[in-house]
């Protein structure tokens, strides 16, 4: 697993992100692949706090963001959430059955928030309007999150006063 810490540069795709989040319409709901474990573990492995749900992927994360929106605060129980995109085709659910909760933002855009029904860990979001084929993984679910760093911070208008801005692009709401 020597490549785990290899931190390839991740392109900043702010425009696509903004366009995607502001896009209307309704996404097709589908669950990520659920396949049995293959011989080789993928590069990144992840699991919930109790270990019932495990998943893995090979792709280098994209759209790595700190989000301070109210929903991320409520859903994570923390001051913000850090997540990133992974191609759905590469995302493999190894064990367990996440429960999903459909959330619709004020903008009308929706997503399915997937969590462990046993321990409550928030794991990943799927079916994001405007992001077909991408699953957004919560960084805390990774077994080895080292080397994956946020490339932007968004909804900073909801930032709690004691949190400090990182030296990366800051967006009061969605990147524009
Ligand atoms: Zn669990
Ligand atoms: Zn958020």
Image (cartoon, rainbow, N blue to C red):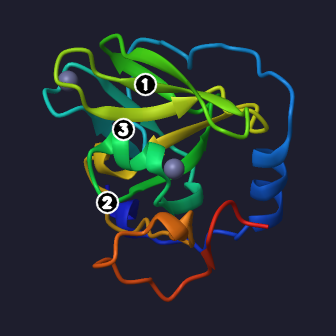
Q: Which mark is residue 79?
A: 2
Instruction: For label 1, count other residues whose C-alpha is less than 10 Å away and answer few (under 14), some (14-19) or many (20+).
Output: many
The secondary element bearing badge 3 is classed as helix
The mark nearer the N terminus, 1 or 2, is: 2
Q: Is residue 24 left or right of residue 104?
A: right
- SS at circle 1: strand
Residue 173, by quadrant, is: bottom right
Q: Residues within 10 Å of mark 3 (few under 14, many from 20)?
A: some
Quadrant of the image occupied by residue 28: top right
Most foreground residue, 105 or 52:
105
Whole-angstrom CA distance, mark 1 to mark 2, is 19 Å
Q: Check if mark 3's residue and mark 2's residue have beta carbons within 8 Å.
A: no
Question: Taking 56 as reference, is 126 left or right?
Answer: right
Which of label 1 and label 2 is nearer to you? 2
Q: Where 6 sits versus 86, above or below?
A: below
Query: Which mark, residue 75?
Result: 3
Labelled disc at residue 114: 1
In the image, 29 versus 89, the foreground residue is 29
* Residue 115 lies in quadrant: top left
Residues at marks 3 and 1, CA–CA distance in whole angstroms? 11 Å
Position of 174 relative to 108 (above/below): below
Q: Quadrant of the N terminus?
A: bottom left
Residue with the most extreme bottom position: 167
Residue 40 drawn above or below residue 21: above
Q: Residue at x 37, y 49 (%)?
A: 73
> Mark 2: few, some, or many residues within 10 Å (few <14, many ≥20)?
some
């Amino acid at each position: 697993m020597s490549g785990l810490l290899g931190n390839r540069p991740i392109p900043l795709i702010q425009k696509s992100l903004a366009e995607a989040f502001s896009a209307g319409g309704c996404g097709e709901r589908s669950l990520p692949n659920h396949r049995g474990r293959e011989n080789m573990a993928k590069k990144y492995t992840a699991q919930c706090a109790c270990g019932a749900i495990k998943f893995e992927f090979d792709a280098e994360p994209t759209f790595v963001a700190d989000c301070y929106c109210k929903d991320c605060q409520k859903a994570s129980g923390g001051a913000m959430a850090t997540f990133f995109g992974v191609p759905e085709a590469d995302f493999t659910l190894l064990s367990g059955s996440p429960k999903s909760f459909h959330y619709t933002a004020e903008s009308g855009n929706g997503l399915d928030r997937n969590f462990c029904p046993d321990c409550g860990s928030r794991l990943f979001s799927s079916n994001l309007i405007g992001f077909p084929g991408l699953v957004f993984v919560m960084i805390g679910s990774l077994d080895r999150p080292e080397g994956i760093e946020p490339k932007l911070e968004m909804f900073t208008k909801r930032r709690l006063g004691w949190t400090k801005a990182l030296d990366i692009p800051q967006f009061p709401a969605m990147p524009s």
